[in-house]
Image: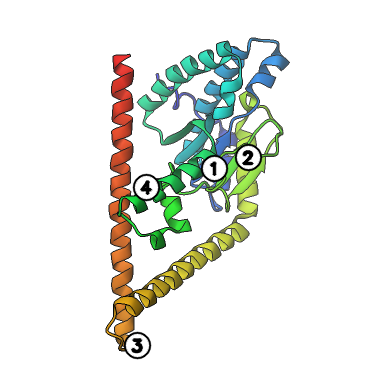
Amino acid sequence: MSWIREGELNLIEKLSANILKAGPMPKHVAFIMDGNRRYARKRQVERQEGHTQGFDKLAETLRWCLNLSIHEVTVYAFSIENFKRSKDEVDGLMELAKQKFIRLLEEQCFLNVCFAYTSRHEIANAVGEMAWGVEQGLIKSSDVSEALLSRCLYSSNSPNPDLLIRTSGEVRLSDFLLWQTSHSCLVFQSVLWPEYSFWNLCDAILQYQLNHRPLQKARDQHREGQALQQHEADRACLADLLQHHGNGKPLDAQRRREALLNYTASREERVQDFLGALQHKRDSFLTDLTSQAALA
């Protein structure tokens, strides 16, 4: 029996989903699944039972997302800070996560799981990767930009979340996707994660829809600003290149445009080669890690 696809929406839920889908819908939703331990205390059960209920709620929420045509979900499953909890709780969470995520992989749903993660570490790692690229001669220091940093993040293969939801009443991001959610709709809900409902999700989506226009405008302005900044940086690099390696004769407007296009193409080629080398470096690291785990 499928864990994700068990059960269907009832008639009222289907009607509500169809009404929501008539408006702009988030394509990618991120969740900070907070409140498992408080749920356990509230129900007077073991913490592990609270975490189990939390994972089951994730499966149910993924089903709702599929019914709402939300095809990508990212969840904050375990932060680096969570390792400060008791050994029994951490060990129990690890085993539970192993069981549940293996089952989720069998469903083939598009789920990104942030495990042993903090956003500051991710950003610092991306900066380090760009520095490595410069040291290796794969890119120039002038190629380093905000846009390139985004392409060096762990989430570079996914669009930024349109909507981020945090449960349990906490109004903070807890070092989760700080870079990626700069133009996302942030919704903080008081419900504990194991008690999350279809209607809580609908409420969050409605808030996204009410704020969609200004959010989209901000995204467009940011994208245009990035493009202009890159264009100006390419022009400055080209001017410097011509000053030091040109024949001393000024270029006419047509030849300057052609030279700028050629420089931009060469920069993008360098960047693509660097990103390919970076992916190979990461793949090799994961392969070595998997081999070491198998031998342990």
What x and y, as percent, mark residue 20? 57, 46
The answer to which image quadrant residue 128 occupies is: top left
Identify the amino acid type marked 1: Leu
Badge 4 element: helix
| Sequence-earlier tag: 4 or 1 | 4
Q: Position of residue 252 (x, y in %)?
A: 32, 89
Name the residue: 52% across, 17% down: 93
| Amino acid at dot 2 | Leu
User: Which residue sits at x=47%, y=15%?
Assistant: 95
Q: Pointer 1: what residue? A: 177
Say what secondary structure mark 2 lies in.
loop
Residue at label 4?
132
Task: Name the residue tied to disc 2.
Answer: 173
Question: As rendered, which of 160 and 22 lies closer to the eye?
Answer: 160
Circle nearer the viewer, 1 or 3: 3
Residue type for callout 3: Ala
Using the numbered discs, state the Cα–Cα distance from disc 1 to disc 3 in whole angstroms. 43 Å
| In front of the other: 244 or 166 | 244
Residue at far front of view: 244
The picture places residue 160, in percent across and down from the top left corner, at: 49, 48
Marker count (numbered): 4
Q: Say few, some or many: other residues with alpha carbon within 10 Å of mark 2 (under 14 / 14 to 19 / 20 or more).
A: some
**Spatial CA span between label 4 and label 1:** 23 Å
Q: Are marks 2 and 3 in contact (CB under 8 Å)?
A: no
Q: Earlier in the sequence, mark 4 or mark 3?
A: 4
Which residue is denoted by mark 3 in the rendering?
253
Q: Are marks 2 and 1 in contact (CB under 8 Å)?
A: yes
Q: Quadrant of residue 217?
A: bottom right
- Closer to the chain start, of discs 2 and 3, is 2
Above-or-below relation of 124 to 239: above
